[in-house]
Image: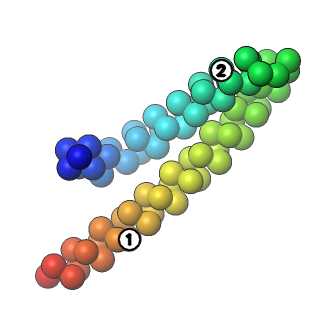
Amino acid sequence: MEAVESWISQHKLATIGTVWGGAIGASMTYSRARTPLKPSLRLIHARMHAQALTLAVLSGAAVYNYYQKRVQENVK
């Protein structure tokens, strides 16, 4: 678990980009199977879902960073 946390901590932007890209792909796949929308509308909806997920991930990263710095200050 520490190895994963360490990698994510060192590669924050790559992690967020991967989550965003995965969310686009998952949303496109889901909407293709569930709703008969035009491809352009599917892409718009997928982008909106990915942006919402990205905001959630960024918020989580901010909270994690805050607590990580707080723990380091308490150790000193």
For this rendering, which residue is in front, 76 or 34?
34
Residue 7 in view (yes/no):
no
Q: Which three-letter amino acid code belongs to the residue tagged 2?
A: Thr
Instruction: Indicate the position of residue 2 as horizontal and vertical percent values.
Output: 20, 49
Placement of the C terminus among the 4 image quadrants: bottom left
**Marks 1 and 2, the one that precedes in the sequence:** 2
How far is the residue under mark 1 from the one under mark 2?
Answer: 35 Å
Q: Which residue is drawn at 25% across and 75% down?
A: 71
Q: Which three-letter amino acid code belongs to the residue tagged 1?
A: Tyr
Q: Comparing marks 1 and 2, which lies closer to the viewer?
A: 2
Q: Is residue 32 above or below residue 53?
A: above
Q: Which residue is drawn at 85% across and 18% down?
A: 36
Q: Which residue is drawn at 46% across and 34% down?
A: 18
Residue picked out by circle 2: 29
For this rendering, which residue is in front, 30 or 47?
30
Residue picked out by circle 1: 66
Looking at the image, residue 76 sits to the left or right of residue 17; the answer is: left
Instruction: Indicate the position of residue 52 as horizontal and vertical percent values.
Output: 65, 48
Write down the quadrant of residue 63 in the picture: bottom left
Q: Which element is circle 1 on?
A: helix
Q: Which element is circle 2 on?
A: helix
